[in-house]
Image (tube, grey):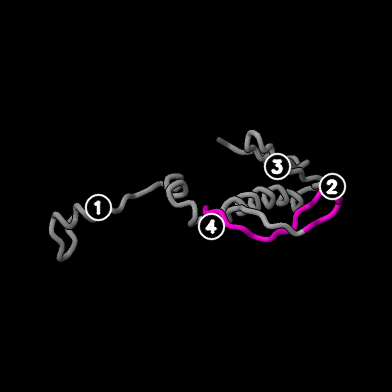
Amino acid sequence: MKRKGGTQKEDRELAARFSKLNDVEHVLKRPDTYLGSLDPCTETRWLYDAALGNMVQQSVETSPAFLSMINELLTNAQDRQYEEELRCIKLSVDRESGRITVYNDGKGKTTAH
């Protein structure tokens, strides 16, 4: 299909610049659109200090995209409280493997594949 006023060469160049992506491809190619910046930044945050047994302010390096993913995981775990009795949410981080696990004691939902 030729666009109005464009030559075939211009149309080919335009088609080469833009590509149709499915949902997964779009998220992987442009994660900052959905999660925020992937670039690390330094911020002052409240953190739990186990040695002191209380919260302390510290400068930490993180990325807004990472914090957005953690927030989504915890929000999804908490959503179960509106449908059933939910008493426990656990978050664990394995620094060596890079694995983050979220657990809640809700029943879960049956899904079809």
Q: Which residue is mark 3?
A: 102
**Residue 102 point in image, percent of width and height:** 70, 42
Which of label 1 and label 4 is nearer to you?
4
> Is residue 92 found left or right of 15 in the rendered image?
right
Q: Dot 1: few (<14), some (14–19), or many (≥20) neighbours within 10 Å? A: few
Q: Which residue is mark 4?
A: 36
**Residue 104 point in image, percent of width and height:** 75, 42
Q: Which residue is mark 2?
A: 51
- Spatial CA distance of label 1 from label 3 is 43 Å
Q: Dot 2: few (<14), some (14–19), or many (≥20) neighbours within 10 Å? A: few
The amino acid pointed to by label 1 is: Ala
**Residue 49 point in image, percent of width and height:** 80, 50
Image height of 112 relative to 43, above or below = above
In the image, 23 versus 63, the foreground residue is 63
Q: Image point 28% across, 53% down: which residue? A: 17
Magenta residue span: 35-56
Q: Earlier along the polypeptide chain: callout 1 or callout 4? A: 1
Q: Image point 61% across, 53% down: which residue? A: 62
Disc 2 secondary structure class? loop
In the image, 47 versus 84, the foreground residue is 47
Disc 3 secondary structure class? strand
Q: Image point 65% across, 49% down: which residue? A: 70
| Residue 39 is inside the magenta segment | yes
- Spatial CA distance of label 2 from label 3 is 24 Å
> Is residue 53 found left or right of 95 in the rendered image?
right
| Residue 42 is inside the magenta segment | yes
Which circle marks residue 15 in the picture?
Answer: 1
Which of label 3 and label 4 is nearer to you?
4
Label 2 with label 3: CB-CB less than 8 Å = no
